[in-house]
Image: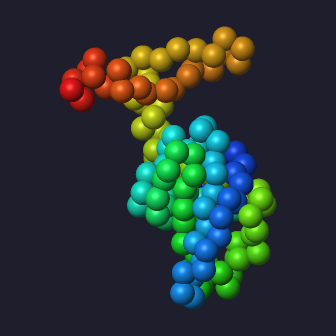
Amino acid sequence: MVQGHVDIMGTVVARRPAGASLDLDIEAPSQVSRFLAAKGSIAVDGVSLTVNTVTGDVFSVTLIPHTLEVTRLADKKVGDTVNLEADMIVKHIDRLMAAQFGGTRNEATHTPRRELSIDTLRRYGFVR
């Protein structure tokens, strides 16, 4: 679920024809890439898309013929920047998890750091 707000900019790092569709690989800063999962959602330039794969900070999406026809995403070249917005529900879950399981504050901005680590998950019994 996205609202049309820009979280951060990403960069197109690859484009591959896929039949009548087009696959784009986009590098996202960690502020957004940490929220991505295969079959999850991401808005790219305001277009809500399904994430195919995530490898580190790079994710892929497929632009189907209809999306290519009614958006400007077909014009994106390698090196072009795109607006990114992560799924709002994932961001809220992250915030709730940080509140529940603790977190630190960024002293420069006075905002909570919401980084859930494997150590935190182990401490609370979610993983062994």
* Residue sitting at x 51%, y 26%: 114
Instruction: Judge by depth and name the residue closer to the eye, 21 or 4.
Output: 21
Front-most of residues 10 and 17? 17
Q: Residue furthest bottom?
A: 20
Relative vertical location of residue 125 with respect to residue 32 in this rendering, above or below: above
Question: Is residue 105 visible in the rendered structure shown here?
Answer: yes
Coloring scheme used: rainbow
Expressed as whole percent of the image width and height from the top left, the position of residue 98 reads 44, 25
Q: With respect to residue 97, does 78 lie above or below?
A: below
**Nearer the observer, 76 or 112:** 76
Question: Percent x, y for residue 91?
Answer: 50, 40
Q: Position of residue 87 (x, y in %)?
A: 52, 51
Q: Is 94 situated left or right of 108 in this image?
A: left
Q: Is residue 46 left or right of residue 64?
A: right
How many numbered callouts?
0
Q: Is residue 83 visible?
A: no
In the image, what residue occupies the spot 60% across and 61% down?
A: 25
Closer to us: 11 or 103 = 11
- Location of residue 8 with respect to 19 vertically, above or below: above
Q: Is residue 103 above or below residue 15?
A: above
Task: Tell me the residue at 45%/34% (across/down).
Answer: 94
Q: Quadrant of the C terminus?
A: top left
Percent across and percent down for residue 26 are 63, 57
Which residue lies most toward the top here? 107
Q: Residue at x 70, y 18 (%)?
A: 109
